[in-house]
């Protein structure tokens, strides 16, 4: 299927929890098995759904978000990632028209119009029949420039129910019904407080994908969906076949890479945008993966990146590895540049309280983390850098996102680099704890939206390397993202 324009579509819904992810997983697996190279995308900030779409398609799922990145950067990322694909599949988020303001800016519908692709609307039809037509007709007419190409009816109770739904849609909406997915508990993926359990943490993940694809293939009009995707090739998708970007290349060979950056990667820390790691390797960094629960010491590194995840689920294991925590604390005291996001911030605090138990952590941040039952910060963040630090200049406005069920106790003993303009951060006023060369924030950023991040990270790492006069042998630098979207531990020349 080479030398063809990439075709694509978005799978969206009237609201969250309508079945978008299940449909996207099923389609990704089905189309891949039919010989299509599927390039999945997730609209909005998300680490978990992309892990499933990557596994189902065998391709790295990437995020598209007009708040986190400029539109021209978003389009370029979309086109580059889709360059070698036959079909681009975008999973929307929330409701189709839900945006960041009253005008719906940043909605899934806005993204579909920007990419000039059709929308397949997934509707949860539980406890409705004829009313489904009123709902769909309203979505068709609300912003008519959004191209609604078909509907998929989910949670259908049986053949009689399906017949009534199809009759109503065909009579009133004049839009094809591309599938009626039965009510089936086997199609439900296990969830917890931040949404679905990530693919790698679900022991039966592969069999879940297999079951979803088998059931959805029986009930979806695959030929009809492929026709809609083919018709989308008339849009400006992939204007001119571009060469694969350097940031997405498999390997980058250099005679003498400048720095090594450690990255915590395990069950507790797994939230990394592929573009963030790619930006570091593109700049010449060697990535050394570290397991926070199994590795007792830090390898020789010039900087450390601790991303988001679920440390609250593995507190006993984390606390038991006190030698790694002690060495991490010593390294920070000795000037090691460290960038930590959310879970990383929690790990670097004095301790974490959960279910009336206290677990000691690294301790370079003197505050204590308390795990709460409800989200303490959720959504987009905008914050201004107001204090000197190792990563961003004063005056820089950072845009990111947060989703945390924890809060800090003892915020009067910390110094923060950023003032919150939108969102919550640490206490609604500030975020991004700084100490020596540490920058620890509840806010997640995306490298495409904050391109200077990688350069500053690499510069700080190089300064640290030169300060301690460390030298490394020559090696090939391999981009640490496999085609399935999983960070690869096969990094040439490094301990992994």
Image (cartoon, rainbow, N blue to C red):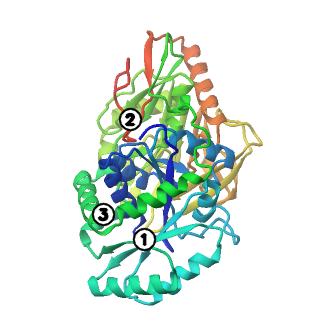
Q: Quadrant of residue 435?
A: top right
The answer to which of marks 2 and 1 sits earlier in the sequence is: 1
Label 2 to label 1: alpha-carbon separation:
29 Å
| Percent position of residue 206, x then y | 25, 51
Q: Which mark is residue 323?
A: none
| Percent position of residue 478, x then y | 43, 24
Query: Is 233 placed left or right of 61 in the picture?
Result: right
Judge whether 417 appears above or below 142 on screen: above
Residue at x 55% of width, y 31% of height: 243
Residue at x 58% of width, y 34% of height: 242
Q: Nearer the viewer, residue 92 or 375?
A: 92
Residue at x 44% of width, y 90% of height: 130
Q: Under tag 1, what secondary structure?
A: loop
Residue mark closest to the camera, 3 vs 1: 1
Which residue in the structure is indicated by mark 1? 17
Query: Is 442 placed left or right of 346 in the picture?
Result: right
Which residue in the structure is indicated by mark 2? 482
């Amino acid at each position: 299927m080479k030398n063809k324009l990439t075709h694509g579509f978005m799978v969206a819904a009237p609201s969250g929890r309508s079945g978008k992810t299940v449909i996207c997983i099923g389609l990704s697996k089905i189309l891949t098995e039919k010989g299509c190279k599927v390039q999945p995308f997730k609209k909005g900030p998300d680490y978990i759904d992309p892990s499933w779409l990557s596994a189902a398609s065998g391709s790295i799922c990437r995020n598209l978000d007009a708040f986190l990145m400029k539109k021209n950067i978003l389009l370029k990322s979309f086109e580059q990632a889709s360059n070698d694909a036959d079909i681009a599949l975008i999973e929307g988020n929330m409701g189709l028209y839900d945006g960041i303001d009253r005008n719906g800016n940043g909605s899934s519908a806005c993204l579909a119009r920007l990419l000039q692709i059709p929308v397949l609307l997934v509707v949860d039809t539980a406890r409705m029949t004829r009313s489904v037509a009123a709902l769909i007709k309203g979505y068709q007419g609300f912003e008519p420039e959004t191209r609604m190409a078909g509907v998929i009816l989910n949670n259908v109770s049986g053949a009689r129910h399906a017949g009534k739904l199809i009759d109503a849609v065909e009579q009133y909406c004049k839009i094809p019904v591309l599938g009626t997915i039965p009510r089936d508990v086997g199609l439900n993926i296990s969830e917890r407080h931040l949404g679905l359990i990530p693919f790698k943490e679900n022991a039966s993940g592969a069999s879940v994908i297999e079951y979803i694809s088998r059931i959805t293939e029986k009930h979806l009009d695959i030929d009809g969906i492929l026709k809609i995707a083919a018709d989308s090739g008339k849009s400006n998708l992939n204007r001119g076949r571009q060469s694969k970007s350097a940031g997405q290349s498999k390997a980058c060979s250099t005679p003498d890479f400048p720095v090594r950056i450690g990255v915590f990667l395990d069950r507790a820390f797994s939230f990394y945008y592929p573009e963030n790691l790619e930006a570091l390797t593109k700049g010449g960094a060697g990535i050394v993966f570290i397991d926070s629960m199994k590795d007792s010491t830090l390898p020789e590194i010039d900087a450390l990146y601790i991303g988001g995840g679920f440390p609250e689920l593995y507190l006993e294991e984390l606390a038991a590895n006190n030698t790694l925590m002690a060495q991490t604390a010593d390294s920070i005291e000795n000037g090691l540049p460290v960038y930590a996001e959310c879970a990383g911030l929690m790990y670097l605090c004095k301790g974490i309280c959960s279910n009336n138990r206290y677990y000691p952590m690294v301790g370079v941040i003197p505050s204590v983390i308390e795990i709460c039952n409800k989200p303490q910060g959720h959504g987009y963040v905008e914050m201004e850098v107001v204090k000197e630090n190792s990563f961003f200049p004063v005056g820089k406005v950072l845009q990111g996102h947060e989703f945390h069920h924890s809060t800090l106790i003892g915020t009067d003993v910390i110094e923060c680099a950023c003032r919150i303009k939108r969102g919550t951060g640490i206490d609604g006023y500030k975020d991004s704890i700084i100490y020596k060369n540490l920058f620890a924030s509840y806010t997640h950023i995306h490298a495409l939206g904050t391109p200077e991040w990688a350069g500053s990270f690499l510069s700080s790492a190089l300064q640290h390397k030169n300060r301690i006069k460390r030298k490394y042998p020559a090696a090939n630098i391999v981009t640490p993202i496999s085609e399935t979207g999983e960070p690869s531990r096969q990094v040439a020349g490094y301990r992994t």
